[in-house]
Amino acid sequence: MTSVATKRMVQGGEFLITDANPNSIFTRDDLEEIQYQIASAIKEFFEKEVIPRAEEVESLNADTIRELMRKAGDVGVLGLEVPTAMGGYGQKKSTALLVGESHTKQSSFSGCIAVHTSVGMIPIVYFGTEAQRRQYLTKLLSGEWIAAYCLTEPHCGSDAMAIRTTATLSEDGKHYIINGSKMWITNAGFANLFNVAAKVDGKKFTMFIVEADTPGITLGAEEKKMGLTGSSTRPVFFDNVKVPIENILGEIGKGHHIAFNALNMGRMNIGSSSYAQLKRSISISVKYAKLRKAFGKTIADFGLIKHKLAEMAIKAYAVESMAFRTAGLIDDQLQSLDPDSSDYLARSMEVLREYAIESSIMKVYGSEAQGYGVDEALQIFGGNGYSKEYPAERDYRDARPSRIFEGTNEINRMLIVDMLIKRAMSGTLPIVSTGEQIIKDVYDTGPLPQIDPDQKDSSPFSKEKTLISNMKKASIMLLWQAAQKWMIALAEEQEVVAAISDCIMETYAAESTYLRTLKHIETKGEESSTYHITMMQVFLNDAVMRLEITARKTLAVIAEGAELGASLKSLQRLLQWQPINTVAARRQIADKIIDRESYPFD
Ligand SMILES: Cc1cc2nc3c(=O)[nH]c(=O)nc-3n(C[C@H](O)[C@H](O)[C@H](O)COP(=O)(O)OP(=O)(O)OC[C@H]3O[C@@H](n4cnc5c(N)ncnc54)[C@H](O)[C@@H]3O)c2cc1C
């Protein structure tokens, strides 16, 4: 493995084969004052305008939601990431992450904004014609119009290419006639515009911009959802709907590129909102835990409650580290592009595609960490957690669909490995040669970096550094051995693929957390980094154990007998780690949370 000494353009998925340097990654501490100012203005909008009207939103008052969307347009939240040449604000991804943090108190309205700005607007921004942008973008940026995205159908969601909605050219060649049914369409109740996936002549997957008042469109009843009750989710029916040929998005037969690219952007957003939700779970539950008494103590004094509070914070720290690292990668590449060049949009889309592996990791790891947080927050509230009178109940329900939409977590787990293998096969990433070298080193008991239990290497956190490098090797070893065994049939071994994905995700999370901590120490000093260090060490301690268990189980699927024995021995050699006292460490973190009544930093 090579070592990166200076900041440079990093390829998507490269984290798995290259040991990065703390200064090569972006962290939350690198945010600039202007980014905080933008986020603060938008936070103020949420606090002053949205939160006081939460009940109206939750009862799906369309007039209120429309009015709030127009106000959201006025404060700039709808055009945050849209290029300035198109009337947007051209802000960085890292700014969008920071802004996303203010959304957690009203998940339904946030969902409305998220769909509108990602899958609603992205297809028009990146794939629309000049005329389409002129016609629709100004209205969407101002919030005068609300957008929705129609991909899922009653019989298919994950298997998006199986849609049955058809588009047939009219006899005069001026329109496409759309017929079909869509389901689970967010914003449907008040949308003015639908981006609709349909198959031209029943074969060619194509996206269309369809105005909501076009004759032939009808809406089904609101879904009776378990959460996000202030988000409109309805079926949309298309019965001989005439759409002008000018409203085709991109090219006929290439609509799946648009659909999947738009989803890819949404994945990154889910990942980022998840760490903000974890912080909210900490805030609401620590305040409750300090008031609630049992057995003569406040429940915040109990070790098991402290464990939950600390674990939420550790997960938030890890997900946030990954989120800003990934946003930094995207921002670095976007800033190297010339916004005036004719291929700016195409190249921007390539940048976003470049980090599709990291975006899928953010989506899966983030949404599952968020799931942990809302579940444990409810548990801290005890019986009251199960009552609608307390916030934990709604958070629990609202968070659940994050694991379902924008590609389910099962689909994204498959995608992570699939995308890595494609990059390996095309030679974009040297995973094959790295894998061969690792296998050689591991079996030859060659020059594998060993974790030095006596820490003879005096550089700070050298044990952690070696361990992360070896977590990468273990993940590649698994991927390599599975690919050798099943070749192209590996995709059929879904349990193995998902396990490899889990190892890769743990590795990205562990390295991002480690690098962020080291960067914090370098800039702020070790004394000011006590809690950063503790969180990193507990996360790493547990991540390596999770990885080891997953890898051991998976190796037993791939190999048997002497071959399995040799693989397990190699794994053990790679993942030597003396466990730390995580109880003491978590209590220390929890005490800080209890003292601040919130996440330890920010
Ligand atoms: C609140 C909410 C809002 C939504 N908003 C929108 C929207 O605005 N627009 C829109 O188009 N859609 C929307 N959706 C739909 C969402 O995108 C789909 O529910 C999702 O893609 C899953 O599809 P499905 O429900 O058909 O489940 P299925 O595809 O039937 O999946 C069912 C289960 O099988 C698993 N599965 C499926 N295929 C595989 C496979 N190959 N390997 C392993 N496991 C597999 C899935 O992971 C899942 O666990 C929304 C859904 C929800 C809950």
Image: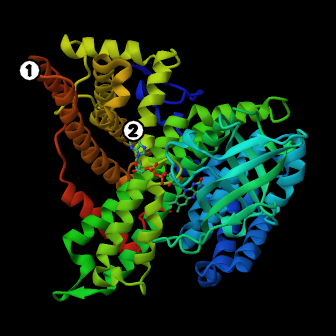
Name the image quarter holding residue 475. top left
Which badge, 2 or 1, comes first in the chain's sequence? 2
Rendered image: mark on residue 561: 1
- Closer to the camera in the image, 58 or 466: 58
From the viewer's perspective, is 315 left or right of 4?
Answer: left
Rendered position, 574 above or below 250: above
* Residue 153 appears in view: yes
Query: In the image, residue 554 lies at what x, y percent?
Result: 22, 32
**Is ligand 1 within 8 Å of the beta carbon of the residue shown at mark 2?**
no
Neighbours of disc 2 within 10 Å: few (<14), some (14-19), many (20+): many
Secondary structure under the numbered disc 2 in the rendered image: helix
Reading the image, the residue beneath label 2 is 511
Give the amino acid type for the residue marked by disc 2 in the picture: Glu
Drawn side of residue 246 relative to residue 431, left or right: right
Residue drawn at x 54%, y 68% as measured from the top left: 104
Locate the N terminus and report the quarter of the image it occupies.
top left
Mark 1 nearby-residue class (10 Å; few <14, some 14–19, many ≥20): few
Q: Position of residue 202 (x, y in %)?
A: 66, 38
Q: In this orientation, does residue 89 appear?
A: no
**Side (left or right) of 88 relative to 589:** right
Q: Residue at x 50, y 35 (%)?
A: 357
Numbered marks: total: 2
For the residues bearing labels 2 and 1, Cβ distance under 8 angstroms: no
Closer to the eye: label 2 or 1:
1
Tell me the quarter of the picture where residue 236 sits: bottom right
Q: Nearer the viewer, residue 64 or 268?
A: 64
Name the amino acid type tagged 1: Gly
Q: Is mark 1 within 8 Å of ligand 1?
A: no
